[in-house]
Image: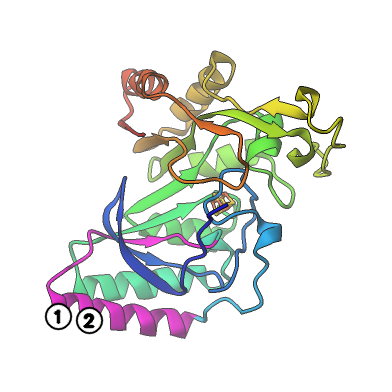
Amino acid sequence: MSTIIYPSPIFGPVHSRRLGISLGINLLPADGKVCSFNCIYCECGFNEDHRPTLPMPTREEVAEKLEQKLRQMVADGQLPDVLTFAGNGEPTCHPHFAEIIDDTIRLRNQYCPKAKVSVLSNATMIHRQTVHDALMRVDNNIQKLDTIDPIYINKVDRPVGNYDVEKIIEGMKAFRGHVIIQTMFMRGMIKRSMIRSAEGRLLPEGRKNDQWSMESVDNTGEEYVAPWLEVVKAIKPQQVMIYTIDRETPAHDLLKATHEQLDAIRDRVIAAGISCTASY
Ligand code: SF4
């Protein structure tokens, strides 16, 4: 298994499929993962396999290291297209997320005014007013919505605490169009023992090493796409980004959605009058 734990608080720049030359800002500890989801496709691995021992970086540390890196990039003549909050988990879990956004916008304006500030988030904290307000100040407020089916969410995103998809949808609508929805489409199977019940408990394993212990995680079918698309229309995002598995995943029996499947979903979003990109 090959998963990535990113340096903290600054990493890269890396070339992102969706964002261009991206300088990463990681508000999570440098030696592990902190996330309110535990996705079976997470490139950082499963939460339980990467418990951190170090603290999250402080607000001051993030600003200092970001300024150092931007100065160096200016001196090298290599400016970022985007400053991206991502890394080892969920950035909005940081207790000073809002203040760090303000520091970042100030430094962006000073060193690379054309760069966008992007946040990749799983949307679990958008009900917090300070988080909502900070996300309204960034250029690309990218929020995950893999499905609206609670059973599928517990199978694939596996929230760590309480998760109410209706509340998340209301939180997305409250951005009044200042939101980009990001959705992972994939196929394949997972072991039944990886699935959480609606109450958050892991399901019993079932019989090992036979197909009864595996369940499909395919969300490319009409039963998932049609209700998801209706909710997307109701949220009225500025854009939708659909994508599929790109790197090795901690669960081993996942498969990419096909180009044809992604193109067909993308075309339906565009037909609904919403800009949409597909990454393969
Ligand atoms: S939300 Fe992102 S960081 Fe968190 S587990 Fe899922 S893929 Fe990993």
* In the depicted structure, whether residue 8 falls above or below residue 167: below
Q: Is residue 43 visible?
A: yes
* In the depicted structure, whether residue 208 falls above or below residue 30: above
Q: Does 271 sit left or right of 163 as displayed?
A: left
Image location (x, y in percent) of residue 130: 53, 63
Give SS at disc 2: helix
Dividing the picture into quadrants, the one containing residue 251 is top right
Q: Is residue 150 visible?
A: no
Can you name the residue that lies furthest to the front here? Answer: 209
Q: Amino acid at mark 1?
A: Ala
- Mark 2 touching mark 1, by CB under 8 A? yes
Residue drawn where x is 87% and y is 37% of the image: 204
Whether 82 is among the magenta residues is yes
Image location (x, y in percent) of residue 71: 22, 81
Front residue of 265/13: it is 13
Image location (x, y in percent) of residue 132: 50, 56
- The residue to which callout 2 is attached is 71
Q: Amino acid at mark 2?
A: Arg
Residue drawn where x is 84% and y is 36% of the image: 205
- The residue to which callout 1 is attached is 75
Q: CA distance from mark 2 to mark 1?
A: 6 Å
Callout 2: CB less than 8 Å from ligand 1 = no
Residue drawn where x is 53% and y is 54% of the image: 2
Mark 2, Cα crowd under 10 Å, few <14 / some 14-19 / many 20+, is: some
Can you name the residue that lies furthest to the top here? Answer: 222
Give SS at disc 1: helix
Front residue of 8/105: it is 8
Whether 144 is among the magenta residues is no
Q: Which residues are magenta?
A: 59-88
- Residue 193's disc number: none
Residue drawn where x is 45% and y is 59% of the image: 86
